[in-house]
Amino acid sequence: MKEKFNIITSTCIPLPMENVDTDQIIPARFLKATSREGFGDNLFRDWRYDKDGKPIETFVLNDPTYSGCILVAGKNFGSGSSREHAAWAIADYGFRVVVSSFFADIHKNNELNNFVLPVVVSEGFLAELFNTIGVNPKAEVIVNLPEQTITNRETGHSETFDINPYKKHCLMNGLDDIEFLLSKKNDIEAYEAGRK
């Protein structure tokens, strides 16, 4: 069972780049492992480190000014290949929420399956978030999964977001698909017994 989602209040890490694809999130050369652990070390690897493996100071993940478990990303996040390793890397790094104005569908579902909440906002709200974080890197955002709202605490502006009801239930109860089925074991057995 994973950590349950409810209300997350956090500072944010801004990545104001559009069309970030899964190969940029986790380069193909790191896909050999089959365990989900350790992928966070190579999240945005080619932007984060130079060819000698030294951190690139100008990249946001290497900038101590920014911190938090919410990644605010540009439009069309997670395009390209369907590799689930990209979601593994985001989750393993410690992000609980990714905010964007548009996600590639497969990547969005991969995030949900790995207990990362993708929050789709309007382009105007996204622009406001980037501006707020730029002015005050300690600005906090509240993501309320039960109410399906995201709030910029600096401005007080909120938006609602959509989520599949089943995935919402799983996130709020810390259940993956198998754990969800196991939680329904008694109901399934009762239904089967009634069919005999």
Image (tube, rainbow, N blue to C red):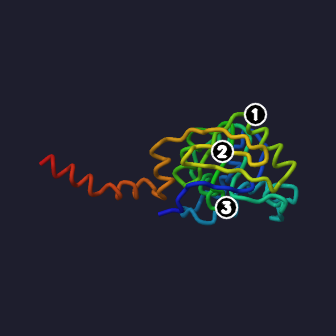
Is residue 142 toward the left or the right of residue 33 in the image? right
Is residue 63 toward the left or the right of residue 119 in the image? right
Which residue lies under the disc numbered 2? 150
Q: Earlier in the sequence, mark 1 or mark 2?
A: 1
> Looking at the image, can residue 114 be seen?
yes
Badge 1 amino acid? Gly
The total of numbered circles placed on residues is: 3
In the image, residue 62 above or below residue 113: below
Q: Residue at x 19, y 50 (%)?
A: 192
Badge 3 amino acid? Tyr
Horizontal and vertical percent for residue 45? Answer: 74, 57
What is the CA distance from the residue labelled 3 to the residue labelled 1?
A: 28 Å
What is the CA distance from the residue labelled 2 to the residue labelled 3?
A: 22 Å
> Looking at the image, can residue 90 be seen?
no
Q: Return the residue nearer the eye: 145 or 185.
A: 145
Which residue lies under the disc numbered 3? 93
Which residue lies under the disc numbered 1? 124
SS of the residue at dot 3? helix
Q: Nearer the viewer, mark 2 or mark 3?
A: 2
Badge 2 amino acid? Ile
Find the residue positioned furthest to the left: 196
The 10 Å Cα crowd at callout 2, few under 14, some 14 to 19, many 20 or more, is many
Q: Residue at x 64, y 49 (%)?
A: 143
What is the CA distance from the residue labelled 1 to the residue labelled 2?
A: 13 Å
Q: Are marks 2 and 3 in contact (CB under 8 Å)?
A: no
